[in-house]
Image (cartoon, coloured by chain):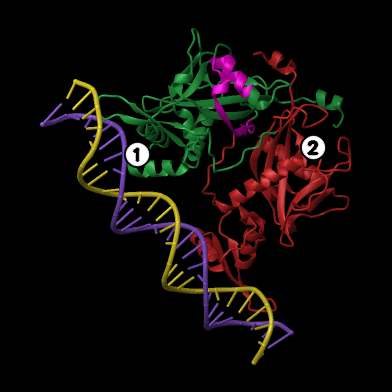
Chain colours: A red, B green, C yellow, D purple
Amino acid sequence: MTSKDDLDKYNKPGLAVDVILFTIKNDDIKVGLIKREDNPYLGKYALPGRFVRYNEKIEDTARIALKLKGKINPGEVFLEQLYTFGQNLKRDTRIRTVTIVYYGLIDSNKIDFQEGNLFTWHSVYNLPEIAFDHKRIIEYSIHRLRKKVQESDFAFQLMSKEFTLTELQRAYEVILGTELDKRNFRKKISELHILKDLHKKKKGPHRPAALYSFTRQRNDKSEWKPDF
Amino acid sequence: MTSKDDLDKYNKPGLAVDVILFTIKNDDIKVGLIKREDNPYLGKYALPGRFVRYNEKIEDTARIALKLKGKINPGEVFLEQLYTFGQNLKRDTRIRTVTIVYYGLIDSNKIDFQEGNLFTWHSVYNLPEIAFDHKRIIEYSIHRLRKKVQESDFAFQLMSKEFTLTELQRAYEVILGTELDKRNFRKKISELHILKDLHKKKKGPHRPAALYSFTRQRNDKSEWKPDF
DNA sequence: TCAAAAGTGTTCTACCTACACCCATGT
DNA sequence: ACATGGGTGTAGGTAGAACACTTTTGA
């Protein structure tokens, strides 16, 4: 099986990409799901996904899926490859399918829910009926998300342009599922040197909080990521 | 594109698995490569790989590749999924191919080099001419291997059934590329509680060293790995 | 003036690092 | 007896965890 003809003819498995988008709303981790309009699993909820076309880079496939299935502007989303699932031959009941899963975080305000959008947020602690094996994939991705958030500034994707330190801390707490010490948290964040003091205050019923933005987008100590 | 027929007809990219097997020989990290007998890249060295057949689990594809290309008994090898490469549409000059890469470590003594085996070990610091984009893949995998070895007992796969603590330490040192303190290393290992004192001694020209084996196979604190 | 969230340092602890000498054996 | 690698403990430093009060504003 070495010529182009041989390779084209051999019976290839399907190759798909699924995307797990997380956000935080009401102090809860939400995952974005699509209500299926077709069989199999008609009416159940699935991760937005798409089969990889012959001339699509796999990360582009992920972004196209977000755009088509969720009407999400894919430029807004930072995605990271999670894992490739292909052990179970019956994952998809139609054809044998291997799925590359990406995950990412987004500020839920950045999503413009148009009329008829089937993309909706669901608490990861109270999921609806999930299609395929996507439930297990979501569970695994939460595990990896927590790990990632602990060892990088991945959580920063959740924030809007201006935010207070308490809001940032709250985002960490919701994802990690633990309470954090305010002073230790602020010390740790300030050592990253990625915050810009906007010299503005967020007014509220009580003492105003300083507003910050990020000086640069990302600062991931944990690893270099390939793009090839 | 939802029926089985549609899915079968759409122009799928090729899906392959490549395997990076590392070992240690002569205080050097070696990677197992296959000399290519076909075009493209005839005569160059490539990672052992294989296109995923319709009814093969992807990890099975990896093991079959090791068996067919390297005459390696795949039961001996612990593999971990590294990453899936599919950004470059021209990675393979024949057809557009997405590759799932697995990596693992093996005690080089476990490999039985039969006559005519094209699988050979090459120092990662002095690679021959490499086919496809496998050179960058190897570089990335070394990075990930070091990380993995630091935060788990992954390196234990390199050892034979009975080994001395100095041999184990040497394996760590070669992979990490640093010298380790003997006392600190032994303290750290003993806290893992995975060594069994065989109450045997390795005889040599000098003071005999105690021989150990592992009580269980693996103890990976870093994460749970999916198998679906 | 009171309620509510913002903001700010120090101490303690646990883990990691650095470091040096005696031991057991083969020759 | 000596050369060579095997085997062992302690002290200092550093990073993370625990912890409480004062400040600023709106109502």
Residue extending furthest top?
A: B115
Identify residue type, mark 2.
Phe
> Is residue A207 placed above or below B205 in the rendered structure?
below
Residue extending furthest front?
A: B199
Q: Residue A58 versus residue A38: which sits nearer the camera?
A: A38
Label 1: which secondary element: loop
Q: Residue A164 versus residue A73: which sits nearer the camera?
A: A164
Label 2: which secondary element: loop
**Where does residue A101 sit, x and y in percent of width and height?**
69, 39
Which segment did they paint magenta? B61-88
Q: Can residue A30 be seen in this view?
A: yes
**Where does residue A115 sit, x and y in percent of width and height?**
88, 53
Q: Is B121 left, or right, of B37 in this rendering?
A: left
Residue at 51% across, 29% down: B138
Q: Is B171 left, or right, of A93 in this rendering?
A: left
Identify residue type, mark 1.
Glu
Q: Can residue A63 be seen in this view?
A: no
Kindly identify which numbered label has been placed on residue A137.
Answer: none
Residue at which label 2 appears: A132
> Is residue B84 placed above or below A105 in the rendered structure?
above
> Between marks 1 and 2, how big is the CA–CA gap?
48 Å
**Are the residues at dot 1 and dot 2 in contact (C-beta closer than 8 Å)?**
no
Share a chain, discs 1 and 2?
Answer: no
> Is residue B95 placed above or below A100 in the rendered structure?
above
Q: Residue B135 versus residue A37: which sits nearer the camera?
A: A37
Residue at which label 1 appears: B179
Q: Mark 1 lies on which chain?
A: B
**Where does residue A139 sit, x and y in percent of width and height?**
70, 45
Q: Is A222 left, or right, of B93 in this rendering?
A: left
Residue B74 within the magenta-colored segment of the rendering: yes
- Residue B42, located in which quarter of the rendered image? top right
Looking at the rendering, in which quadrant would you find the C terminus of chain B?
top right
